Each structure stands twice: as C-alpha cells, then as structure tokens.
C-alpha cells in the first residue's frame, strides 16, 4: 500500500513539474517582410514564421520570375514548409532561393508532423 501511495505521489509531482515547464505564452509579433520591394533588386527576403500550428500570415505574395530568399523561422515547435506544385521544401532555420515563373496560387503546408493541428497548418503563396 505504501509503495502505491509513493508511486502516485511521485507521478503527481512529475505532472506538476512538467506543467510548470510548458511555455504557452503567445509569441510576440515580429515584423516580417511579406512583399517584394519594387526597388529593382534581383532578390528580396521573405520570412515565414511558424508557431502553434499556424503560419504568421494566411497569404504571402511574390512576383513571378523574381528570386526571393525564403526563410522559415519556427517560434514554437519544429516545423517545415513545402510549397505544393513545386520542388521547394525547407526546414526550420533554412533559407532558400525561390524563383517561380508561373503566376498563380501555391499552397504552403507544414511538412513536419507537429501535433494535433498539423493538418490545418496551411498558407497560400501568391505569385503575381
């Protein structure tokens, strides 16, 4: 009986310690460049921030035929991005040069199983 009580107490303590270590605070809003500058530069930067089973924007825009340095920043958890109908795929912290010449809408999905909301983690890349 004492062993059972000791085991139950230890498990409660483990749960309390684990709950105290969880960071559920919302990440602060980071300013990101989600449009391509009209300065005539050959490339620009686009940062996609992933956290809590969502991307920071529902839609990102780039110009057709222009190279964009796409960076994935995972604030909460481990995420990846795959741009459907293309071969572009990146992991947390990666920056890749993206050049899509065909205008249209391309769905962006999380490519790393990240938990309960993984299937709903989507955004759209609009190529104008």
Image: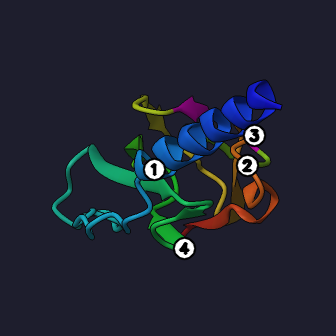
| Residue on which the image places disc 3 | 113
Q: Quadrant of residue 3?
A: top right
- Residues at marks 2 and 3, CA–CA distance in whole angstroms: 6 Å
| Residue at the (38%, 68%) spot, across then down | 26
Q: Earlier in the sequence, mark 3 or mark 1?
A: 1
Q: Which residues are magenta?
A: 86-91
| Residue on which the image places disc 4 | 59
- Residues at marks 1 and 4, CA–CA distance in whole angstroms: 30 Å
| Residue at the (41%, 45%) spot, across then down | 21
The foreground one among 24 and 19 is: 19
88 in magenta: yes
- Furthest-bottom residue in this view: 58
**Location of residue 6 in the rendering, given as x and y in whole percent from the top left corner:** 67, 31
> Would residue 111 appear left or right of 57 to someone viewing this image?
right
What kind of element bears circle 1?
A: loop
- Residues at marks 3 and 1, CA–CA distance in whole angstroms: 20 Å
Mark nearest the camera among 2 and 4 is 2
| Residue at the (54%, 30%) spot, across then down | 91
**Location of residue 52 in the rendering, given as x and y in whole percent from the top left corner:** 55, 60
- Residues at marks 4 and 3, CA–CA distance in whole angstroms: 21 Å
């Amino acid at each position: 009986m004492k062993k059972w009580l000791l085991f139950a107490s230890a498990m409660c303590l483990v749960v309390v310690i684990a709950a105290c270590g969880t960071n559920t605070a919302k990440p602060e809003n980071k300013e990101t460049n989600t449009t391509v500058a009209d300065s005539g530069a050959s490339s620009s930067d686009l940062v996609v921030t992933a956290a809590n089973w969502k991307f920071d924007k529902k839609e990102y825009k780039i110009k057709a035929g222009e190279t964009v340095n796409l960076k994935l920043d995972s604030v909460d958890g481990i995420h990846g991005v795959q741009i459907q109908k293309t071969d572009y795929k990146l992991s947390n912290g990666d920056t890749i040069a993206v050049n899509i010449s065909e205008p249209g809408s391309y769905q962006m999905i999380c490519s790393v199983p990240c938990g309960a909301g993984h299937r709903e983690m989507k955004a759209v890349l609009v190529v104008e």
